[in-house]
Amino acid sequence: MNKYKKLAMNTGIFAIGSFGSKILVILLTRLYSGYLDPESSGIKELLEPTALFLQPIFTFALQEYLIRFGLDKEYDKREVFTTSGFITLAGMLIMAVCVPILSLIPALSYIRGYTILLVIYVTTSSLRMLCQQFVRSRDMVKLFSLDGILATLTLFIFNLVFIAGFHWGVAGFMLAVILSDLLSAIFLFVVADLGKFIRPAYYNKDLCTKMMRYAAPLIPTIVMWTITSLSDRMFIENMKSDRVELGKTSVAIYGYANRVPNLISMVSTIFFQAWNMSAITENDSADRSEFYEKVYNAYEAILFIAAAGLLLIIKPLTGFFVVSSTYKEYADVYLYTPILVSAVLFMSLNQFLGSIYSATKHTRNSFWTALVACSVNIVLNFALIPEWGIQGASIATFLSYYVCFWVRIIDARYYVPFRFNMARSLINTALLFIMAWDIIAAPNLWVLWLAVLFIIVIVLNFKALLLTVNKLLRR
């Protein structure tokens, strides 16, 4: 099977396995906004990125090195899985000691009362990731996708029982994730027969060293992307302002405003799961640059069209996902969503460009480019949140991803040269921002203007998408 067909097939399989599950997860937003008061929702929105912050640190970027070494035919898969399991176990033990200490930091006071649950949450999530990524490395993408569906169904059911049924609030949410991840890990371990890949004798000290060296620059990279998300919420919770309202309620509103843009992230994640495998396995191919160019052009076009389409229906869509009948504070969530749509789009493009660093093993570049984004985000949060509140956090997030995109589109193409249409990218971005302004300011006939701008985005990108698809099909 050639590289294009394999990429298309894997993307299709991941789409089948992920689309329904991702939609269910977003539908859970209705449940959370209907049953969790703004303060509880704010705590939940702080704990989730905190878990994402802790995981790569204490698993040593498990998701990066396991797929990289697992797909590499040079290494014994038994040694890869056993060694990865050893690193993960050691990291979880260290985390169990560190998290109670972290809860003593004033800015992290929201951890108190959830310390034990947070440790278990990260542990079960890491075990699931260990099994997931190894299954992917064995090219068992159908099983990977099936697990995604089953895990989301169990998550949905547990949330209904614990939050809507028992009214356990934030603790109920965390228990739902813990049980869902645990069942997923057990399912994958049994069905994929992973027991035969893990033995003390398979532990390889030299491989462990190689994994750690590969992952070392990626750990701060992943952490900094998480900080970009977590810092927004922490600034909104802890900063003081005479101009705008801040605090846990604002954290909740900002968190829900991120839900609809995650539909873009959903498309990106489905594609990236397949693309990352192709980028690694095709790294040494003779037509690598042509392959990247064609895929990138199609990917960028799809993202801009999807983002514009999302902005066209953003108000009714946000109203559907975020219930405001119980807590009126959620009624204006849609006003903070448009800029975040563009932010998630460029986060997705950054992820694509980051795959070049992973495939070519230039992970240090991934680190310093992420450092740029993190630094821009923190500085702008300081400047914009006291003045513009939640909207300031949205703008800071967008600009941090946007600056990183331009750094990466220049730097990454030194390692895999491919042509990039700068003019089209700039025009697309400008059109999305005009659409965002149209939604926020709501001038006369603003819905009509949204429709016109959406059509322009389609016209601008459809030709590039069609040409790329035709080239791929001819292959």
Image (cartoon, rainbow, N blue to C red):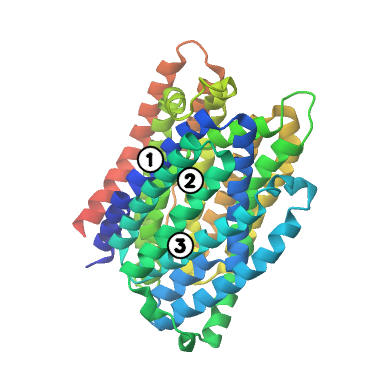
Q: Can residue 474 be seen in this view?
A: yes
Q: Is residue 363 left or right of residue 305?
A: right
- Mark 3 or 2, nearer chain start: 3
Q: Residue at x 28, y 47 (%)?
A: 467
Quarter of image, res 142? bottom left
Residue identified by numbered label 2: 422
Q: Which amino acid does label 2 sit on?
A: Met
Residue 412 in picture, x, y percent from top left: 52, 61
Q: Which residue is drawn at 62% across and 47% down?
A: 47
Mark 2 residue element = helix
- Tell which of 44 and 157 is nearer to you: 157
User: Where residue 23 is drawn, which disc sits there?
Assistant: 1
| Above or below 178: residue 254 | above
Residue identified by numbered label 3: 128
Q: Is residue 217 visible?
A: no
Alpha carbon separation for disc pair 1 and 2: 33 Å
- Tell which of 135 and 370 is nearer to you: 135
